[in-house]
Image (cartoon, helix red, strand yellow):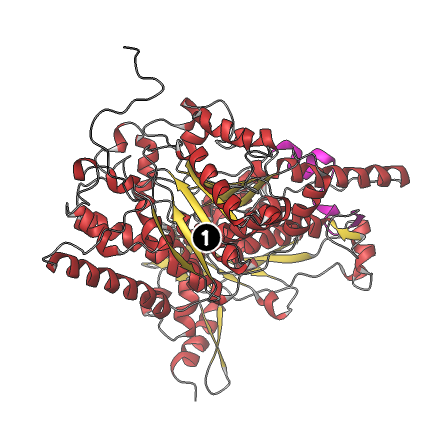
Amino acid sequence: MLRGAPARTATNMEASLTVPTATSVRSVPVKLLWDNRTVINNHLARARGGKVSFTHLIGYAMVRALKAMPEMNVGFDTVDGKPNLITPAHINLGLAIDVPKPDGSRQLLVPSIKAADNMDFAQFWTAYEEIVVKARNNKLTVADFQGTSISLTNPGGIGTVHSVPRLMKGQGAILGVGAMEYPAEWQGASAEAIARNGISKVMTLTSTYDHRVIQGAQSGEFLKRIHELLLGKDGFFDDIFRSLRIPYEPIRWSNDIATNHDDEISKQARILELIHAYRVRGHVMADTDPLEYRQRSHPDLEIESHALTLWDLDREFATGSFGGEGRRFMKLRDILGILRDSYCRTIGIEYMHIQDPEQRRWIQERVEQPHVKPPREEQLRILLKLNQAEAFETFLQTKFVGQKRFSLEGGETTIPVIDEICEAAAESSLDEVTIGMAHRGRLNVLANIVGKKYSQIFREFEGNIDPRTVQGSGDVKYHLGAEGEFVAGSGDKIKVSVAANPSHLEAVDPVLEGIARAKQDVLDRGAEFPVLPLLVHGDAAFAGQGVVAETLNLSQLRGYRTGGTIHLVVNNQVGFTTSPGSSRSSLYATDVARMVQAPIFHVNGDDPEACIRVARLAYEYRQAFNKDVVIDLVCYRRRGHNEGDDPSYTQPLMYDLIEQKRSVRKLYTESLIGRGDITIEEAEQVLRDYQQQLERVFTEVREATSQPEEWTTVPDYPEKPAGEAVTAVSPRS
């Protein structure tokens, strides 16, 4: 005796026998579908996590085809003894889900995604996964099964090549998806023969329809429409990439190009041209802007510009020195994978202007490698530093409303980057890291890198300023220097100091170089250059102030060199109120550094793991070649220039985007959880610990009744002598 769901299934099958059906069949090549799915999932694995299946893409193509052909989204019913055409208001796509039961039996459920026609691909993917999770967890309700207008079943997942499924009463059609296989006559061929002859796997699509309301020509046209979409027509894959915010153009369908022996030699040369193009201009296609999403491209980086097609992806080519030792031949798919990972993800590298081949080769050996995820301990350290940076700024914004502090919000990744540089310097047993920086983020660096006591920073906000400082208040807390000791995760220690900067901007650059050179001269350890200068710049000032170019131009001279400076440009894409397009002619704020042949690493501030990788690479380059190196940390400024102004008056479009953005800490936490690297509980615990620490210190400061015994302001202010001083420029009497 059948009871419950099995009994309902039997009843439905009996009812389906009353539906007069016919079936259309079409074979579709799936090479483009396969390749674009690979690009999508490679991006997701590096970003938010998750995986897109073939059925997600086919289902979305089905919805797009139905929007173009609403006559397929209909049903039949008898009302008062008269036949009626049912036209649903929306596309409610039923999904055939095979659910295993505890007793080992299986149950077929067909819940539906409601109003799929109103969704972009990202929304459709999310709704699809939610329905599947509900089915697996036995959480489906009656509402999930109601109103289904058309269904999708994919028995190809278990190897079925061709399916003619039953059609339920009330639905107009059901799409069956077969397995993806090479044509039968090619299934014994080698992979090399298949690639050489341009053979694609194919799948069979079947459209089983209610012949009372849908005609065979309509069904055939419907399958043709899906076929065209899966070959990229009408921007199908462009829309999918856009909805998932994948910053590259999808692979395009094209016919294979027949070649003879001479053409093969020419094609080999074009492969080497493509590799060179990525090395020179890959940074143009890199996803380095955390604010603006767009699909980036450049003619030199498109395989079509080099007369290559998707059919060449699985063919092997000689690559010379590319790809490391022992790899004389590589598939174009693997070549492009390494090139994109190296030059077009969230890091863009300018280095081919360097004339020394050894330096170029050094960079290539380190970046032209398959992506390796950082270890879990490194991820947790990055998250800890982001938590510290954000919690510190949020705390000051909450407790000292309206006070100027030139916050680092939007550029919090600066703290993990400086932390990584200091960590590397400590592991190398350098003597000191000397930091020169402008006002933006200065307090955060003093607190989270140098180790200046929170209590003293809070006292200064409370107005308890060192009486020796001029006027005792105002901007002074942003200009003070400090020194402390940095402790690396390995336990190594190194001295770290921030030079006093009486200016908001770049006047500290030559001062810091002088401090570093003087300390190196005192230590007298020659070419070791044991003091590392680290200059933190703003983007507008780096491009706009002449002192930057002057300092760079002195960097390699025997009388001024310091063994290489790491320049960290906190690029918040606005200078006070001025956009880059109104403040400089150069493409990048860092172009001035090309004149001394410094490598420039542009990196997306919303990808902390990439930022840490760049920080380590920049440090190792400085150590290897004793030359300047530039990190262009592309981020944004969440608040006004000094928290007292409203930036939306001068940059309304930019600040519309910024208001909608979640912080880098939240984005990184979500991606770690999405990729399964950490649990939600671990992420919450890290933040909670730091917030409790800040609250405790703040309470202590508020309750303190006395001034501190000594002020730790560095440098000490000398007593000024009484009377007039005679100088070389005193007016003649």
Residue hosting label 1:
608
Residue occupying the point 24% across, 64% down: 692
Residue at the limit of the structure toward the top, as seen here? 733
Q: Is residue 566 left or right of residue 441?
A: right
Query: Relative to the observer, which residue lies in front, 263 or 346?
Result: 346
Residue 386 image point, x, y percent? 37, 55
Residue 292 visible, this angle: no
Q: How many marks?
A: 1
Q: Assign a secondary structure to mark 1.
A: helix
Residue 17 image point, x, y percent? 50, 69
Residue 428 within the segment the image draws in magenta: no
Query: Relative to the observer, which residue lies in front, 379 or 651?
Result: 379
Looking at the picture, which amino acid does disc 1 mark?
Answer: Pro
Residue occupying the point 44% across, 80% down: 6
Q: Quadrant of residue 5?
A: bottom left
Residue 318 within the segment the image draws in magenta: yes
Which region is colored magenta?
298-319
Tell me if residue 197 comes above or below residue 148 in the rendering: above
Query: Relative to the observer, which residue lies in front, 733 or 372?
Result: 733
Image quarter where the N terminus lies is: bottom left
Q: Is residue 244 left or right of residue 444?
A: right
Residue 625 visible, this angle: yes
Q: Quadrant of residue 555?
A: top right
Q: Is residue 81 left or right of residue 219?
A: left
Image quarter where the C terminus lies is: top left
Crowding near pointer 1: few (<14 within 10 Å), some, many (20+)? many
Residue 358 image point, x, y percent? 72, 43
Residue occupying the point 28% across, 53% down: 392
